[in-house]
């Protein structure tokens, strides 16, 4: 191969991904872009393909074909057609690179080039939101024999891990994550200083908590990953572990007590002992948070229904302005205690929110009468169902029967 051709081959995948980012970051695509814009009609009225089909040929000829797809002269100028072109070019690159891999021996320079090109083509398809791209990438990585190029092997491993994370999350079944958590942990033990791999692991653990009934799987993932990351010799990895510790602490709350400290809006210190024997909902909220304010009516309804039976709400306000908060609480006649601390800086900063890694609101924590957390998912109708399960019938209903 001529030096220019080697250079083009080395940069092709990066160019595809860069153009992919350009296309997706541009102005909103038209409706047809979701399935790809149609190619232009030729002189005889026939539609000419923007991307020519993959030819039969030697690995060198296939590589030349792949390089031709990265020629700017072959690319359309409109955003919609560019997105269509990128999808087709990436798919064609993956197919052609697969043939190069099949027709060359492991360890050969062309073989490794084929692996690189197919890997990056699948990454491009994944970035473009192509259905099944994450699964295809994970399957491709697992099908490869051991690679003699350590850097390429590491790239494949990281790409496969990211793809598997996406596939597991898309499936929506937390139980499917157990095997992946084990593989990521094994990879981290081999190289605990790998920041990219550490971020992939933390991303999986954090997002598992957002799946239905995903809290136990998320807690198990954090319990597996955190000791490895905390023992890393890499300052960035240890910093990531430190930043994530608070999130891990919150996600691991179910089945354990929650520490509640702070100052009441009145200025008096809060005493958690007053909650002994009660079912408690801790609500992290703010007056500027639309969903938080919308939930107040539901909270008030459940509070009035169940308070005499032993239900309490503790609001943790993340407001910055005390006067605005006090005015809101008074105007809405909120009956439950509110914890508030002066921010002490820009943004909302409450020690309790920081301690439990609150990154978005509303966030709620439901605690049982025994003091152990029951769930982190108790808003709307779920709160009503949980209270009925925990407290039986509300006193008002019992009184109505007499």
Image (tube, rainbow, N blue to C red):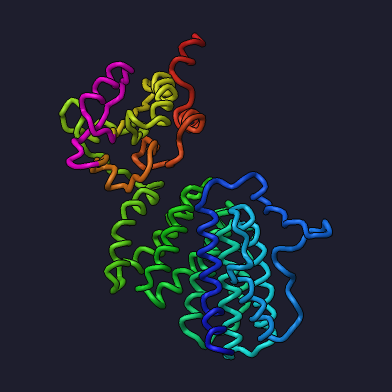
Coordinates of residue 207 in the picture (x, y in percent): 47, 52
The residue positioned 46% from the left and 39% from the top of the image is 377
Q: Is the residue 139 above or below the residue 323 in the image?
A: below
Residue 82 part of the magenta segment: no
202 horizontally vs 34: left or right: left
The mark total stands at: 0
Instruction: Give the image quarter of residue 48.
Output: bottom right
Residue 337 part of the magenta segment: yes
The residue positioned 31% from the left and 52% from the top of the image is 246
Coordinates of residue 186 in the picture (x, y in percent): 45, 73
- Which stretch is magenta? 318-346
Q: Nearer the viewer, residue 402 or 262?
A: 262
Coordinates of residue 167 in the picture (x, y in percent): 58, 59
Instruction: Give the image quarter of residue 283.
Output: top left
The residue positioned 43% from the left and 23% from the top of the image is 302
Coordinates of residue 178 in the picture (x, y in percent): 52, 62
């Amino acid at each position: 191969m001529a030096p220019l051709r080697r250079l083009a081959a080395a940069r092709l995948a990066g160019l595809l991904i860069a153009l992919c980012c350009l296309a997706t970051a541009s102005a909103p695509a038209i409706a047809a872009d979701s399935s790809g814009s149609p190619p232009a009609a030729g002189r005889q009225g026939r539609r000419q393909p923007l991307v020519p089909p993959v030819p039969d040929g030697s690995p060198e000829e296939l590589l030349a074909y792949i390089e031709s797809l990265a020629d700017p002269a072959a690319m359309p100028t409109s955003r919609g057609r560019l997105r269509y072109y990128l999808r087709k070019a990436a798919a064609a690159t993956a197919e052609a690179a697969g043939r190069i891999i099949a027709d060359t021996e492991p360890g050969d320079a062309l073989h490794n080039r084929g692996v690189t090109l197919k890997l990056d083509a699948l990454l491009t398809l994944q970035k473009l939101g192509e259905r099944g791209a994450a699964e295809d990438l994970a399957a491709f990585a697992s099908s490869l024999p051991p690679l003699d190029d350590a850097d390429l092997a590491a790239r494949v491993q990281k790409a496969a891990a990211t793809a598997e994370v996406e596939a597991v999350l898309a499936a929506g079944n937390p139980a499917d994550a157990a095997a992946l958590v084990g593989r990521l942990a094994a990879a981290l033990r081999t190289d605990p200083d790998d920041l990219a791999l550490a971020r992939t692991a933390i991303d999986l653990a954090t997002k598992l908590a957002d799946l239905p009934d995903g809290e136990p799987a998320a807690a198990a993932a954090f319990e597996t990953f955190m000791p490895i990351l905390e023992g890393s010799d890499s300052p960035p990895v240890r910093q990531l572990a430190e930043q994530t510790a608070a999130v891990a602490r919150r996600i691991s709350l179910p089945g354990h007590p929650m520490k509640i400290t702070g100052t009441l809006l009145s200025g008096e210190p809060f005493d958690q002992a007053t909650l002994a024997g009660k079912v408690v909902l801790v609500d992290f909220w703010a007056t500027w948070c639309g969903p938080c304010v919308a939930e107040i009516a539901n909270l008030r309804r459940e509070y009035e229904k169940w308070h005499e039976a032993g239900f309490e709400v503790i609001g943790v306000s993340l407001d910055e302005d005390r006067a605005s908060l006090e005015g809101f609480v008074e105007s809405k006649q909120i009956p439950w205690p509110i914890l508030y601390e002066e921010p002490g800086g820009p943004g909302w900063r409450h020690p309790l929110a920081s301690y439990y890694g609150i990154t978005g609101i509303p966030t709620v924590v439901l605690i049982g009468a025994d003091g152990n957390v029951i769930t982190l998912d108790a808003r709307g109708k779920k709160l009503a169902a949980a209270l009925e399960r925990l407290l039986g019938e509300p006193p008002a209903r019992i009184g109505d029967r007499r």
